Image (cartoon, coloured by chain):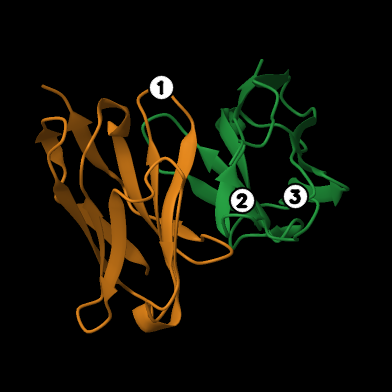
Chain colours: A green, B orange
């Protein structure tokens, strides 16, 4: 159960866009459309942002979008706002242990 | 609205046991699979275990397999995590979470510290 690979950090100015990658294998990201993205502010529980690769969770603005190509999923945050500054984790269902696997996490900074 | 409230955490010595509980409300508990996840201090998230909606499926992370047991009582809308043979590396904030392939809601977490 190796963690999915994410860049440790990403940043952008208010109004700009940032894209976070999440690279897995043919046993997880590449095999299933059960890829989710979670936002976690310091000291808070994670919050579902994107599920099943492209679907936005209830109440999530359309500035957040997800995609996938092969073994790599991506989260794009457009029109960056101060409140978008948080840690972001991807997660995928994994077919060997039949349990999810998280990404390593990406800290997004709004400059 | 969905509420998940964890309890049962604390400080425990290595090798000892602890049982976490999660009280669920605001949704049809019997219709959903449930997870336990954890986050060590300053570290990332880790899925610990998942259980099917009727308890017929259980899956565990390799790091806890054989030591932890996930269970549920659908008559009480409760999820449990029995943690045996605890190790220092099990020290973390443990979250109860709703969903099987997609986890949609999380509790606020309960701290477990394994230390002599």
Quadrant that contains the C terminus of chain A: top right
Residue at horizontal 16%, vertical 30%? B14
- Establish if B69 lies above or below B78: above
Find the distance from the CA under tag 1 to the CA under tag 2: 22 Å
Q: Which marked residue is nearer to the observer: mark 2 or mark 3?
A: 3
**Subunit of mark 2?**
A
Asked whether the residues under marks 2 and 3 belong to the same chain, the reply is: yes
Which quadrant of the figure has residue B3?
A: bottom left
Nearer the observer: mark 1 or 2; the answer is 1
Which residue is found at the position 44% from the left and 82% from the top?
B31
- Left-right relation of B89 to A50: left
Q: Are marks 1 and 3 in contact (CB under 8 Å)?
A: no
Q: Which chain letter matches label 1? A: B
Circle 3 chain: A
CA distance for labels 1 and 3 = 25 Å
- Relative depth, front residue between B33 and A1: A1
| Quarter-of-image position of residue B56 | bottom left
Residue drawn at (29%, 67%) of the image: B71
Disc 3 designates what residue? A29
Q: Label 1, on which residue?
A: B42
Task: Depth check: give the residue in front, A109 or B69.
Answer: B69
Image spot of residue B51 (x, y percent) = 41, 67
Secondary structure of the residue carrying numbered label 2: strand
B86 over B99 or under it: above or below = above
Determine the residue located farthest toward the right in the rendered image: A69
Quadrant (top left/top right/bottom left/bottom right) for the N terminus of chain A:
top right
Q: Looking at the picture, do discs 1 and 3 lie on one chain?
A: no
Q: Earlier in the sequence, mark 2 or mark 3?
A: 3
Residue that carries the numbered disc 2 in the rendered image: A49
Seen in the picture, residue A81 relative to B100 is either above or below; the reply is above
């Amino acid at each position: 159960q190796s963690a999915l690979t994410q860049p440790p950090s990403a940043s952008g100015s208010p109004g700009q866009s940032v894209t976070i990658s999440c690279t897995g294998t043919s046993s997880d990201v590449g095999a299933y459309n059960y890829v989710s993205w979670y936002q976690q502010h310091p000291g808070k529980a994670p919050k579902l942002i994107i599920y099943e690769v492209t679907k936005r969770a209830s109440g999530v603005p359309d500035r957040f979008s997800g995609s996938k190509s092969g073994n790599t999923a991506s989260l794009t945050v457009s029109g960056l706002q101060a409140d978008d500054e948080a840690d972001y984790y991807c997660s995928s269902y994994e077919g060997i242990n039949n349990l999810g696997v998280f990404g390593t996490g990406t800290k997004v900074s709004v400059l | 609205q969905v509420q998940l409230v964890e309890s049962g955490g604390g400080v425990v010595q290595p090798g000892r046991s602890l049982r976490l509980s999660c009280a669920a409300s605001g949704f049809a508990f019997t219709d959903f699979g449930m997870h336990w996840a954890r986050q060590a201090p300053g570290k990332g998230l880790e899925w610990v275990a998942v259980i099917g909606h009727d308890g017929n499926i259980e899956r565990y992370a390799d790091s806890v397999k054989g030591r932890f047991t996930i269970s549920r009582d659908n008559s009480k809308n409760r999820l449990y995590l029995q943690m045996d043979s605890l190790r220092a590396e099990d020290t973390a904030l443990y979250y109860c979470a709703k969903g099987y392939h997609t986890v949609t809601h999380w509790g606020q977490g309960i701290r477990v510290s394994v230390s002599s």
